[in-house]
Structures are given as structure tokens and as C-alpha cells.
Image (spheres, grey):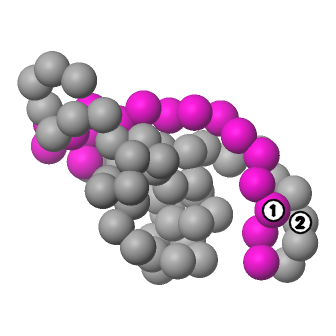
Amino acid sequence: MSWHKQGEGVTTIEAREQLDVMQPAPRIFELRKMGLKILTIWTTSINAQGKKHRNARYVLMSKGGAA
């Protein structure tokens, strides 16, 4: 799963379960410091155990410069 190519982004739950990123928020912070423009959209998702959680969906807008 390459979230930045799909244009739909990735939720915190998807990052943990599919990309093996245990702490997505600090990684997004690092990517933003590198110049990537990443939009945060708050959403509700169901995890693998069937529990509903409020979490972020991160969408790559551009790799720096204009969106």
C-alpha cells in the first residue's frame, strides 16, 4: 500500500495495521518537516477488532511548493 500514490491518504488505523507504522502522527510531523504538504482530516474508522475510533486521515497534497 503506497498511500501517497492513491490520493485518498491513510488513516491512523490503516498506517498501523497495513503499513506497520505504530505511531503515525510523529512520522507525519517528520515528513512535514521534510517539506511534504500533508492534510489532516478527522474521521471515524473501525479497527481490525471491530471497534470504532476517531482518528486522522493523512492526505499527501504535494511534495513541497504549491499544492
Q: Secondary structure beneath disc 1? A: strand
Residue at 41 percent across and 73 percent down: it is 1
Query: In the displayed structure, does residue 49 sit left or right of residue 13?
Result: right
Q: Position of residue 49 (x, y in %)?
A: 85, 78
Q: Is residue 26 visible?
A: no
Name the outermost residue toward the top. 66
Do tag 1 and tag 2 residues touch (Cβ < 8 Å)? Answer: yes
Q: Which residues are magenta?
A: 31-48
Residue located beneath label 1 in the image: 46
Q: Position of residue 3 (x, y in %)?
A: 39, 60
Q: Earlier in the sequence, mark 1 or mark 2?
A: 1
Residue at 77 percent across and 46 percent down: it is 44
Residue at 81 percent across and 62 percent down: it is 46
* Amino acid on which disc 1 is placed: Ile
39 magenta-colored: yes
- Residue 52: name its quadrant: bottom right
The image shows residue 43, relative to residue 45, as above or below, that is above
Mark on residue 51? 2
- Residue 2: name its quadrant: bottom left
C-alpha separation, residue under disc 1 versus residue under disc 2: 5 Å
Query: In the displayed structure, does residue 49 sit left or right of residue 37?
Result: right
* Amino acid on which disc 2 is placed: Lys
